[in-house]
Image: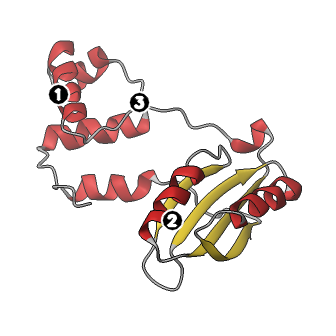
């Protein structure tokens, strides 16, 4: 899927940087910062949403505070049949332990980002994944420490470059 690169003016970029830092920043406060009314800021943000630049607003939660103590990446070599893959991808979306599904080019076809409570939950999830028609082989990598886990950095860099 090819997405058109949105043309953002300087104010759009500055607003996006502010919202990355605090998605709940009051529109009146942002308006004061940029010499605009609350309504003008609201309209800008609505336009960014409508154009698909802003996908939504969210809260960052520490997974460990919810008992999700183990992160793993599961790489899958998949069956080449398109129908089988589409059916399996639909099933993978239903697993709450899978936070991201990426389709790859290269030796592996699918990358799953997984958050689970413990090794037993990971083992059970792997057994279920292996039962899917598309799965020929998997390789699992368990994260023991995250040195950097901040997906906003590339976005901030792109906004700063313009």
Q: Is residue 37 visible?
A: no
- Element on which disc 1 rests: helix
Q: Earlier in the sequence, mark 1 or mark 2?
A: 1
Residue assigned mark 1: 44
Residue assigned mark 3: 23
Q: Residue at x 23, y 28 (%)?
A: 45
* Circles 2 and 3: CB atoms closer than 8 Å: no
Q: Nearer the viewer, residue 159 or 85?
A: 85
- Element on which disc 2 rests: helix
Q: Residue at x 71, y 63 (%)?
A: 131
Q: In the visual, does 118 lie left or right of 73?
A: right
Q: Nearer the viewer, residue 82 or 68?
A: 82
Camera-side mark, 2 or 3: 2
Q: Earlier in the sequence, mark 2 or mark 3?
A: 3
On residue 84, the disc is 2
Within 10 Å of disc 2 (Cα), the crowding (few <14, some 14-19, many 20+) is: some
On residue 33, the disc is none
Q: Residue at x 81, y 48 (%)?
A: 117
Q: Residue furthest bottom?
A: 107
Task: Please identify the quarter of the rendering in which residue 9 is found.
Answer: top left
Q: Position of residue 6 (x, y in %)?
A: 15, 49
- Element on which disc 3 rests: loop
Q: Position of residue 86 (x, y in %)?
A: 46, 59
Q: Residue at x 32, y 58 (%)?
A: 157
Within 10 Å of disc 3 (Cα), the crowding (few <14, some 14-19, many 20+) is: some
Q: Position of residue 128 (x, y in %)?
A: 74, 58
Tally of numbered tags: 3
Q: Is residue 160 visible?
A: yes
> Relative to residue 136, is residue 146 depicted above or below?
above
């Amino acid at each position: 899927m090819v997405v058109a690169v949105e043309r953002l003016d300087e104010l759009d970029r500055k607003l996006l940087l502010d919202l990355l830092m605090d998605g709940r920043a009051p529109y009146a406060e942002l308006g004061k910062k940029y010499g605009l009314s609350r309504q003008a800021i609201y309209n800008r943000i609505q336009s960014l949403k409508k154009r698909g630049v802003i996908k939504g607003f969210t809260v960052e939660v520490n997974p460990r505070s919810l008992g999700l103590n183990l992160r793993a990446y599961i790489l899958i070599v998949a069956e080449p049949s398109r129908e089988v893959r589409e059916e399996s991808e639909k099933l993978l979306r239903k697993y709450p332990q899978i936070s991201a599904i990426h389709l790859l080019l290269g030796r592996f076809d699918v990358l799953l980002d997984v958050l689970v409570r413990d090794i037993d939950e990971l083992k059970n999830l792997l057994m279920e994944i292996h039962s899917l028609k598309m799965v020929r082989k998997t390789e699992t990598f368990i994260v023991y420490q995250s040195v950097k886990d901040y997906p906003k950095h590339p976005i901030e860099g792109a906004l700063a470059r313009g």
